[in-house]
Image: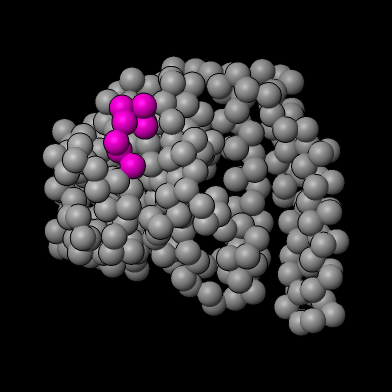
Amino acid sequence: MSAEAEHMKVAAAIPCYNAAATIGACIASLGEQTRAPDEIIVVDDGSTDNSGLLAGYAGANVISPGKNVGLSAARNLLWQNTDADIIVFVDADTVARGDLLEQLLKHYVSPEVGGVGGQAVEARIESIYDLWRKFSAAQTLGDKVLEDAEVLFGLCCSYRRSVLEQVFGFDPYFRTNGEDHDISIRVRQAGYRLVYEPAAVVEHYRTDTFRSLMRMLYRYELFTQVAKMRNDLPIENHYRTFWRRVGFFFGRLSQIVNRMRGFKFALIDLAALAPIFGACYKAKSLARRGLARPGPR
């Protein structure tokens, strides 16, 4: 860990919505780090289960806005309610590996580093859809350190408090997805580097049905493009996205001769074309009508 990081105050921050099944384990994993956080904060974002109560029992400082304010607003409440120098965000359905904070903090060696993030390992495989997500929609940038990454994944990322203040935090426009792409763009536009550290790992305990997987793919693709629009960046041509996914589908067919899973994966790839293309087309429509222009932060 860098000498600078050793003297930084660090807050572990968890946006939480209906995560009673996982929030306790998430908080426990943060309390058992090789470099312990100075505080653990949870925003109970209008949960209808007992997530907030369980988070309090687990030892976290719980903030309850009293209603569902959305993911970006919850993240803002987290960093605005601490005086920590570094805010480490993890999702409520993750469990942090024991050296997560140590791996993230070691890269804060230069003031030009605005944020550091890691990757997720899919740990809950209960269906073919979970297996597909593990191999085809994993939240990872690979196994090498990137000193100037384009994006940090929201479920495992950290930022300097001063940088979040400078860019006015997360954009409340993004209630469910896309806030990580948006903040990454704006931090980089402000002149900072983002560092990706593959050794910083959280285990992800999400599970999907066919319907939830298709909805996830639609929201991810749509709000990734909207994040570009709201920061005056060109969006990807939806036809190019479609044909790239078609190529991915045919590439998957080569697995069929080796194992049945390849055939099932190919069917999911084929089904995924619809929400992905639909999201890209929707983004193009929003851009054409000017409906995703930057607004108040």
Is 213 covered by the magenta stretch?
A: no
Residue 42, horizontal then vertical, whole percent: 25, 49
Magenta-tinted stretch: 107-114
x 31%, y 27%: residue: 111
Q: Is residue 256 above or below residue 67?
A: below
Task: Name the residue nearer the viewer: 121 or 275.
Answer: 121
Q: Is residue 69 above or below residue 26?
A: above
Q: Is residue 233 above or below residue 127?
A: above
Question: For residue 63, what is the image quadrant?
Answer: top left
Query: Quick check: 81 left or right of 90?
Result: left
State whether the magenta stretch is mostly helix, strand or loop.
loop
Res. 82 visible in picture: no
Question: For residue 259, what is the image quadrant?
Answer: bottom right
x 55%, y 50%: residue: 141
Residue 244, horizontal then vertical, whole percent: 80, 47
Residue 78, horizontal then vertical, whole percent: 27, 39
Question: For residue 195, what is the image quadrant?
Answer: top left
Q: Is residue 37 above or below residue 78?
A: below
Residue 218, horizontal then vertical, whole percent: 65, 47
Is 112 covered by the magenta stretch?
A: yes
